[in-house]
Image (cartoon, grey):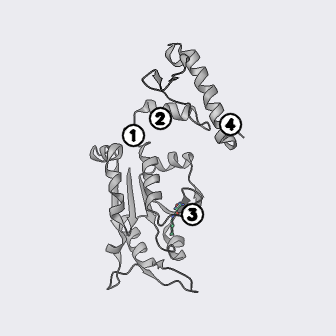
Amino acid sequence: MKITILTLFPEMFAPLYGSILGRAVKEGKLQIEVLNLRDYTEDKHKKCDDYPFGGGAGMVMTCQPIGSAIEAVDPCHRARRIYLSPKGRNFRQDMVYALAACEHVVLLCGHYEGVDQRAIDLFIDEEISIGDYVLTGGELPAMVLTDCVARYVEGVLSPESLVQESFSENMLEYPQYTRPVEYRGRTVPEVLRSGNHAEIDKWRRAEALKVTQKNRPDLLD
Ligand code: 4GY
């Protein structure tokens, strides 16, 4: 699978090449292509933004570099083209599975006051938001989406760690413990050290239900 990221700030994506994702890229399981929108502008001063029609603060990203970049990376329109913005549909785990099944995903990162609506109407399939807050640009959301999707690309994570997750869908995770058995007077729950896997399972389900009721009762409706 290939993820193409279109941005005015390609240097922001350096962290993507570390850790688990970096390994997946090195092993050829995942291709990540970060392209500078400025390389696609036909403006003689390399401008990619302009003043908003109708007035108001800030600048708006122009159509031309976006259109040229998307047509260059996906000439036959086979890719899923996504614009990250707070106006989009809220990002959820079911969308992660759908995107991980795509051959090619293109992520457009906005900045300033956003992009000209015509670029969205002409070149974007879906607008996605990672949450109800406003960031300075779409770069962090693009990294969030890339990280989530990469976990489901064949061979990036072990199948066991993914199975565990889907089995507890619509439920938050149970608490985890590791050594030592006692830390500052707090001991690891006895049942987890019992070796009784039926009891451990039962305890984990009960704890998952407890934390879900407390923090995300909406998931249980
Ligand atoms: N939240 N989810 C988000 C965001 C910043 C102005 C368009 C979000 O996805 N993107 O806050 N993006 C804005 C800044 C231009 C992107």
Count residues near mark 1 (Cα–Cα under 10 Å), then give few for <14, some for 14-19, many for 20+.
some
Q: Mark number for residue 162?
A: 2
Q: Residue at x 56, y 86 (%)?
A: 55
Q: Amino acid at mark 4?
A: Gln
With respect to residue 70, does 143 lie above or below? Answer: above
Q: Secondary structure at mark 2?
A: helix
Query: Of callouts 1 and 2, which one flags the residue occurring earlier in the amino acid sequence?
Result: 1
Q: Nearer the viewer, mark 3 or mark 4?
A: 4
Q: Mark number for residue 2?
A: none
Labels 3 & 4 near each other (Cβ < 8 A): no
Q: Point out residue 29 in the picture as x, y percentages from the top left corner.
A: 33, 44
Q: Amino acid at mark 3?
A: Pro
Residue projecting furthest to the front: 184
**Badge 4 is on which residue?**
213
Q: Indicate the quadrant where residue 180 lies.
A: top left
**Badge 3 is on which residue?**
86
**Badge 1 is on which residue?**
154
Residue projecting furthest to the left: 26
Q: Amino acid at mark 1?
A: Glu
Labels 1 & 2 near each other (Cβ < 8 A): no
Q: Secondary structure at mark 3?
A: strand
Labels 2 & 4 near each other (Cβ < 8 A): no
With respect to residue 22, does 130 lie above or below? Answer: below
Image-based side of 23 in relation to 157, left or right: left
Q: Point out residue 95 in the picture as x, y percentages from the top left corner.
A: 54, 49
Q: Quadrant of the C terminus?
A: top right
Q: Secondary structure at mark 1?
A: loop
User: Which of these two is toward me, 83 or 60?
Assistant: 60
